[in-house]
Image: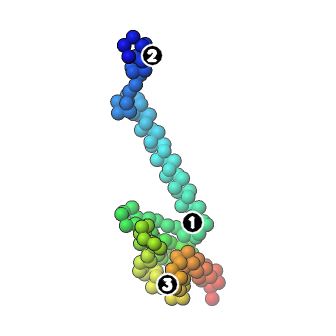
Amino acid sequence: IAGNPTATLQADNFSPLTSTSGSNQQDLGKRHERLKELFKQKTKAFREAVYLLTGFMIDMTQDQNPQLRVRSMFAEREDDHLLFKWQPDVEGGLHLLETDFCSRIDENIFAYLKKCNSVPAFLSTLTLDLFEKQTFLL
């Protein structure tokens, strides 16, 4: 490097990320906050789209064995929800847990879940059943 002005210049301009100046740290912090806010907005928009497309609001717990709280837009009561235990490493990794709402669901609706092991078919049938109860009140 001695005697080579270009090499000296390059070596002088090299600074590892850990020794960034205070203003660079602030810039990184601002960028990080903007990315977090953008991610929050996109996540909220995605959740809304899922709700409008499927009729279900889905909340997930943030632990090692996540649970999915699923609430239908056609639910009769505000606290009516399904609760699934999610085990991503297990085939068919969703397991319906007992809730008060489950005890009020017609047993025939569970056929798709019990006999066919199909959560989407179960949820679709439940949606139609709840929709009909709300729309075609007798």
Q: Which of disc 2 and disc 1 is earlier in sequence? A: 2
Asked whether residue 22 appears in the rendered view, the answer is no
Give the distance between the C-alpha atoms of the residues marked 1 and 2, in whole angstroms. 59 Å
Asked whether residue 36 appears in the rendered view, the answer is yes
| Residue wearing tag 3 | 114
Q: Looking at this view, is 73 or 6 the one in front?
A: 6
Q: What SS does tag 1 mark?
A: helix
Q: Looking at this view, is 2 or 128 the one in front?
A: 2
Q: What SS does tag 2 mark?
A: helix
Give the number of callouts: 3
Q: Position of residue 90 (x, y in %)?
A: 42, 71
Q: Position of residue 36 (x, y in %)?
A: 46, 47
Q: Which mark is residue 51?
A: 1
Q: Position of residue 125 (x, y in %)?
A: 58, 80
Q: Which mark is residue 6?
A: 2
Give the distance between the C-alpha atoms of the residues marked 3 and 1, in whole angstroms. 25 Å
